[in-house]
Amino acid sequence: MPGKQAKILSEDDLQDLLVYVATTRNPIRNRVIVLLSAKAGLRAGEIASLTWDMVVGPTGAIGTVLELRDHAAKSRSGRLIPLHEDLRDALASWRSATYGTGPVVLSERANAMTPLSIVVWFARAYRAVGLEGCSSHSGRRTFITRAARLVHKAGGSLRDVQLLAGHRSIQTTQRYIDGDSDAQRKLVSLI
């Protein structure tokens, strides 16, 4: 992958970002943006393209899965992503503050945000928190790396992480995963 990769967020970094967004003019919407990236692994373009019908279940309440449709996903790689509890709660709060139809993420003028506006939003948020080397892709890389490290506890495999990420190739998923030097030291000591 040419160029620098976006940095992975530590749990403290993510909490700092969530504390920051709580102080902004649109704290609920901004929390949803952060969690869509870090807890669902969505790209900026996917966040911008997400509509309420992709997160609402048959009863009209926020569902248990996000149904990212092909037209909203990069390379038409639609997928089902189970909703993390924090993200479900944030979506429910945001839905009660909006029309609850159309795009999930709206600008302050009630228009759909563009992928570029999501990228710029993340750049400003990371700058405000003092996180260097982070971009709109940092939450996604964090999601994929954490999923890869924990997938064995869920009885899954790297293929499950690939499907959640919407990658066509397992090699692409592997490039997203950040190594852990502590785990490498422990592993070598076990040999």
Image (cartoon, helix red, strand yellow):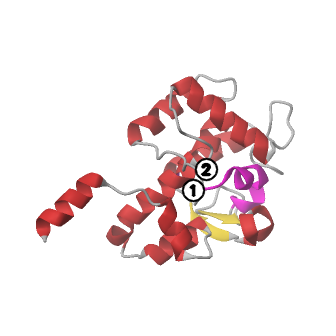
The residue at the point 65 percent across, 29 percent down is 124
Secondary structure at numbered mark 2: helix
Q: Return the mark for residue 40.
A: 1
Pinpoint residue 30: horizontal percent, then vertical percent.
Answer: 65, 36
User: Is 153 left or right of 56, judged from the image as shown?
Assistant: left
Q: Considering depth in this image, is 18 or 130 the residue closer to the camera?
A: 130
User: Is 6 left or right of 117, judged from the image as shown?
Assistant: left
The span picked out in magenta is: 39-56
Q: Are marks 2 and 1 in contact (CB under 8 Å)?
A: yes
Q: Is residue 166 visible?
A: yes
Pinpoint residue 142: horizontal percent, then vertical percent.
Answer: 48, 51
Q: Amino acid at mark 1?
A: Ala
- Which corner quadrant of the image does residue 157 belong to? bottom left
Q: Is residue 26 magenta?
A: no
Q: Where is the C terminus found, in terms of image quarters?
A: bottom left
Q: Is residue 44 magenta?
A: yes
